[in-house]
Amino acid sequence: MRKDVRILLVGEPKVGKTSLIMSLVSEEFPDVVPYRAEEITIPADVTPERVPTHIVDYSDAEQTDEQLFQEISKANVICIVYAVNNKKSIEKVSCLLLCLCFFPSRVPLILVGNKSDLVEHSSMETILPIMNQYSEIETCVECSAKNLKNISELFYYAQKAVLHPTGPLYCPEKKAMKSLCVKALTRIFKVSDLDNDGILNDNELNFFQRTCFNTPLEPQALEDVKNVVRKNLTDGVCDNGLSLKGFLFLHTLFIQRGRHETTWTVLRRFGYDDDLELNQDYLFPPLKIPPDCTTELNHNAYLFLQSVFDKHDKDRDCALSPEELADLFDVFPYMPWGPDVNNTVCTNEQGWITYQGYLSQWTLTTYLDVQRCLEYLGYLGYSIIAEQESHAAGITVTRAKKIDLQKKQTQRSVFRCNVFGDIGSGKSGFLQAFLGSNLMRQKTVKEEHKSYYAISTTYVYGQEKYLLLHEVFPDFDYLSDADLACDIVCLVYDVSNPYSFEYCAKVFKQYFMDSKTPCMMIAAKSDLPEVKQMYGCSPLEFCRKHKMPPPQSFTCNTAAAPSRDIYTKLTTMAMYPHVSQADLKSSTFWLRASVGATVFAVLGFAMYRVLLKPR
Ligand SMILES: Nc1nc2c(ncn2[C@@H]2O[C@H](COP(=O)(O)OP(=O)(O)OP(=O)(O)O)[C@@H](O)[C@H]2O)c(=O)[nH]1
Ligand SMILES: [Mg+2]
């Protein structure tokens, strides 16, 4: 909810501060008033903006400077009152303004010329030059406590100045919106331009109107809006829709006509705070992730991300060119993906991220850093466009892995495989091969674009699953918990290097021999002549002894894309870790597992039908 409004009245003695407050409260002019009115609180439901409002009086006669300073720092809007018939009180306005400049928190100010009943002439001529000097002055108003003229207006303006300040939005000298405001509205335009054609058509305008103001625009109102823009701008309306220029013009018009609450409503709906930054509550909605659980995107979030991809894949080649990618991230305050992403997910011939790769990268971010994922969804306007309560609605927190293991089944769709191996054993080649890159293609990758992750999909019994490979830096002293926690372990050795197996054996014995995590030995560079490993036993004997599947021959030195069999096997082992290594070796397991999956699916369907049957 919005903060309370706290209005402070200051000014020369006897200008009518106390009378103004009393007139507002009793709706009649009090003949006798105390020096200082008690603080009054107007409950939210009787104020026009529905926020509790406190009105605080000040009197030189009763209060010290110290007390004045305290009140100034507590207030979020200050009315500087003068009497229009009193020159000295007008001069005092400038002194007060100067003094307020020294306060750290700049709050909106309102100049109030009271006792308008006593003069024929307006004081505006004297006041306007002052007003132009201070951008904090939201507005000025002439009123009379005696005639009750403009009294409720005055307090309404004060309330509005707190809730919808023009300061951050508009520069009166330049008669234009400030750059931060233009930036925010431009982002809002891009998010709302669902087909990304640079124009808000009637559908998009209606959706926008509905999300911001909870009501669709009447067809006539829609035409009226467009006509106003047409009349003032040549290129504000294109193809019967609103261009960005037209959209920005419209908001400038709202602000200039004193309807800046309209612009604020739009900005707040899209997550902006008073400083026109996206607020933390919007970007980081609460999401609890218990230990042993992982985070994934749900179906709804994938659908949304697909639509974002589609709207930016202008040439429909199912990949994002650097320009298309930059356009997609234009609504972000920074470019979230570095060049390493191109070596983390699948790319096309040109090295551009494919549709599949794009979804994989989102899956990776969600898995590794869900806060970041929420932030990114926030920039894309997920909760607004997908009409969800918050971005957290797009995240599935999986159940604890411990329970998966107990129940011997899992609903997860992302599995993590940590890849260990000595320097030069072929880990990176193993990761890159998963992305379809053979040795030739890998050689063109620059060092600074290297990635320690690779993620893509595999099919296990017809179900699409993500396998996330993580290359662990081969330094025993640097192994973190994250390096050890995974669903399956790969131990990579180089068949042509007699000293490479020892590292795998060491890692296995030290970290995984007693763990429940399944392990797989990879005999990499199998295209090269195999040499005898300098170790107590051969890799095959080692695997047999420790009940691991035999070493899997692997090479990425292929003419075409390397084989994907090994990755499917790894995903399967990650999904069914309870299956003994002996079972995994036998072909009957693969058969049984697939039959099991089918039986389960049929059973699920039958149960569904029973549940649907009318009683
Ligand atoms: N004619 C006229 N007189 C007013 C108006 N407002 C206040 N007065 C009179 O001006 C005198 C001072 O009013 P106060 O409300 O006490 O002024 P104040 O600013 O609170 O003064 P301090 O508390 O001493 O700083 C009183 O005699 C009021 O009756 C007005 O709108 N018109
Ligand atoms: Mg007073």
Image: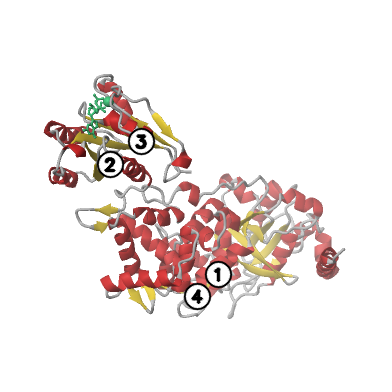
The residue wearing badge 4 is 319
Q: Residues within 10 Å of mark 4 (few under 14, many from 20)?
A: many
Q: Residues within 10 Å of mark 2 (few under 14, many from 20)?
A: some
Residue at image location 63% in from the left, 68% down from the top:
457
State how far apart marks 2 and 3 are (Cα): 11 Å
Reading the chain from its start, which is encountered first: label 2 or label 3?
Answer: 3
Q: Amino acid at mark 4?
A: Ala
Reading the chain from its start, which is encountered first: label 1 or label 3?
Answer: 3
Q: Quadrant of residue 609?
A: bottom right
The residue wearing badge 3 is 27
Q: Amino acid at mark 1?
A: Gln
* Residue 588 appears in the figure: yes
Q: Quadrant of residue 222?
A: bottom left
Q: Amino acid at mark 2?
A: Lys
Q: Secondary structure at mark 2?
A: loop
Q: Secondary structure at mark 1?
A: helix
| Residue 308: % across, % down | 50, 68
Q: Is mark 3 within 8 Å of ligand 1?
A: no
Q: Which mark is drawn over residue 306?
A: 1
The residue wearing badge 2 is 149
Reading the chain from its start, which is encountered first: label 4 or label 3?
Answer: 3
| Residue 312: % across, % down | 46, 72
